[in-house]
Image (tube, coloured by chain):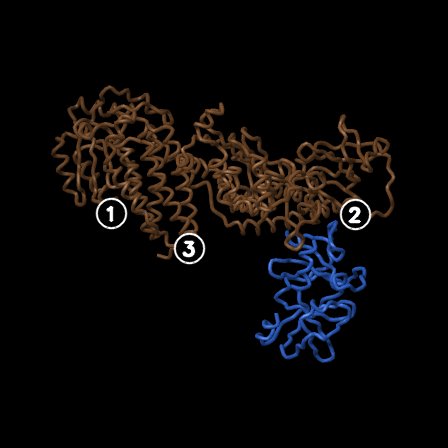
Amino acid sequence: MEVSQYLEMFIEESKENLQACSENLLELEKNPTDLSIVNEIFRSAHTLKGMSATMGYEDLADLTHKMENVLDAIRNEKIAVTTEILDVVFVAVDHLEAMVMDIASGGDGKRDVSETVTQLNAIEKGESLAEVAATTAAPTPSKDESETSSVSKLTYDEFEWTVIDQSREQHFHAYEITVELREDCLLKAARVFMVFELLEKMGEVIKSSPSVDKLEEEQFDQHFTVAFVTHESADDVKQKVMKVSEVTNVSVQMISKNNAAPSTAATSITENAPLENNDDKTPVVAKDQAPAKQAVQAGNKTIRVNIDRLDVLMNLFEELVIDRGRLQSIAADLSHPELDETVERMTRISGDLQTIILTMRMVPVETVFNRFPKMVRQLARDLNKKINLEIIGAETELDRTVIDEIGDPLVHLIRNALDHGVERPEIRVANGKPEEGTVSLRAYHSGNHVFIELEDDGGGINKEKVLQKAISKGIITQENAAMLSDRQVFELIMSSGFSTADTISDVSGRGVGLDVVKSTIESLGGTITIDSTEGKGSLFSIQLPLTLSIISVMLVEMEKEIFAVPLSSIIETAIIRKSDILNAHNQRVIDFRGKVVPLVFLDETFEVPRDETKDDEFLSVVIVRKGEKMAALVVDSFIGQQEVVLKSLGNYLTSVFAISGATILGNGQVALIVDCNALIN
Amino acid sequence: MLTEVATKEDMKVIVFQLAGKEYVIPVHQVQSIEKIMHITRVPKTPSYVKGVLNLRGVVTPIIDLRERFGIETKVADDHSRMIMAKVGELEVGLIVDAANDVLDISPDMIEPQPDVVGSIENTFIEGVAKIDRRLLVLLNLEQVLHPVKQDV
């Protein structure tokens, strides 16, 4: 089979499935008794297994299979969920991720996972789990109990119970039959069909697990369960089913209602119902309903598009918009009612189209953030620390290109925060802090930038030690040291000489490889700043440009030139009198609501050619801010607010002063976007 | 570039005029030739950077080759053209007096640059070719564009 054309899709989907596994495993750790989560994980793992087997990545498929066995055992309540088991499963997921990454980078996805496989096998067999099980609160029905009594894998709704009850009244037997197929069974669906055909001759199948359509699609492992009413005895049924080839085992149990109240729990999917030994409804209900629903959504609602094609689409569309503008002016000249109407319609439709195309490139930062909870869990366990990771603003949308790049620097920073930022629990307690450290990861838009912040409530950075280290390393001189601001001192830990020292954690607690983080972020056109209070914690703030995103701007005009000022930087616009301008140290300022705000004459800053000097009594100003600081940009006139696509000036013109990019206006002309941050000192 | 020239049988080039002289650049570096459109000035850039324009959705910087070469500037007229060139990752438009010819140059017509060619910096020049009575100057676009990248 020619697989290369599917490779990209396989990798993407594998990543998604693994992500789903990780997320649900974390969830499972919080709710160890909620078997619906296990089913979710199982489903993801199963898809992954199927895909990797199809693609010919046997190692990947094998390990997934082993993991699946453990999940299956959990699902069937043969083993209980414990942190130890989850650790092993997490390691397995890590291995799988590494394999997928290897495949993505052109490898063959092979990896030595024998240790994990051994562990998984041991867990699956229940070895060494005796003591584990004893210490856990989760109820684990013993094996003989599950064989002798009627431990149901199926649950029944009210209607089904009625059927069962009625058939009993008519002296039918209601059985639950679990059929196990041989592991190497080639045509599972065919065997299922034969079993069903056989059963239908003897009686009636009320229900099956997995559902019939899933059985037909071979979406099950080696075994399936059916609820069956018949006149025949259990032994007869068993023997007849055993006649079907490739069936290795058949167990037939009487369906008993016990003390269960069938209708209550069956309706709830998310409710974490207490596990009842003989009749737990929730998980199976969830398995039957929730995954089916989700699968439909996931299958039909998204489509993968190469990002380059989107770029082409967007550029083409912009041309269309420009032509639209021309059409509009032509229609206005001709004033032909039908033409007007058509152009109007076209304008509206293309406006809607534009919005759709523009938003297609935006991806929530979630896609990066969602790998962190698992990482933090593992790191916290490795470091013996208690960490609570808060993620805020995961829905913040970023351009795809930025998303792709920002992951690694963030991993670095989070590792740093956990390793060196947050103190050990005992130290925290001694310092009067809660035992559990909090690390917050935040993302938000501000200006034509995205901010991603990582804050911890750890020990903070010791300024003095950083300074001493920097001086001893020759990064700064003694004289310079005195002149540095706090921030500048903290930023020293990101200088390249700093990070190589192996004793660094004694000094500042920070600095391992942070120079790499800094350079990566700077290569993205972003900046990183550090704020820290000793004993209270640190805040790493990354500011990133939206290389290709939509922003709201205010268009302003000077002579014939149009500039765009990002709306998010603007506080307000105002008209001031020339006589209100004050002079302070050769800097013209105005008094704006009690604050002294410096004036920036944009025409001077941008050297706008003037035919004649303007001498108006009134000036139009745009008050912009950068953090706490403000400035008033003096312009000729305001044009209005508009959503624009931010474009770079290209590789030839890099870092033009106070210009952060460009955009194309409706008339096809380019307008430059003012970088307010560069205008305010 | 020279090695490239040497290995090729015939080189297709675009011919353009600048202050009465004829220059050529390889056709594979040229994406299109456009009439002068509206150019948005970019402040605080070298004077030969005329600004940027929207070329089919891509913001493209425009360089006035006359100014780049230190030749006296002239106001754009009907013959003025912008040659949209792509060199590696750089996409720029070059304003020239006129561009109206495509020629095949065989490598043996190309001679190394003479010591002095007008007032243009020698580094910009790849060589010269004589065809009939025409003298064509082969431009090295990488050099023409390179230094600017650093200045700006």
Residue in the picture at 53% in, 41% down: A511
In this view, the mark in front (3 or 1): 3
- Residue A117 percent location from the top left of the image: 29, 44
Q: Amino acid at mark 2?
A: Glu
Question: What element does badge 1 sit on?
Answer: loop
The numbered mark at residue A187 is 1
- Residue B7 percent location from the top left of the image: 57, 75
**Foreground residue, A564 or A329?**
A564
**Quadrant of the rendering where the C terminus of chain A is positioned:** top right
Chain A, hue in figure: brown
Query: Distance from label 3 to label 2 (Cα)?
Result: 52 Å
Q: Label 2 is found on which chain of the structure?
A: A
Chain B, hue in figure: blue
Q: Which residue position is annotated with label 2?
A: A607
Q: Name the N-terminal-most of marks 2 and 1.
A: 1
**Foreground residue, A315 or A575?**
A575
Q: Which residue position is annotated with label 3?
A: A106
Q: Would residue B118 appear left or right of A451 to someone viewing this image?
A: right
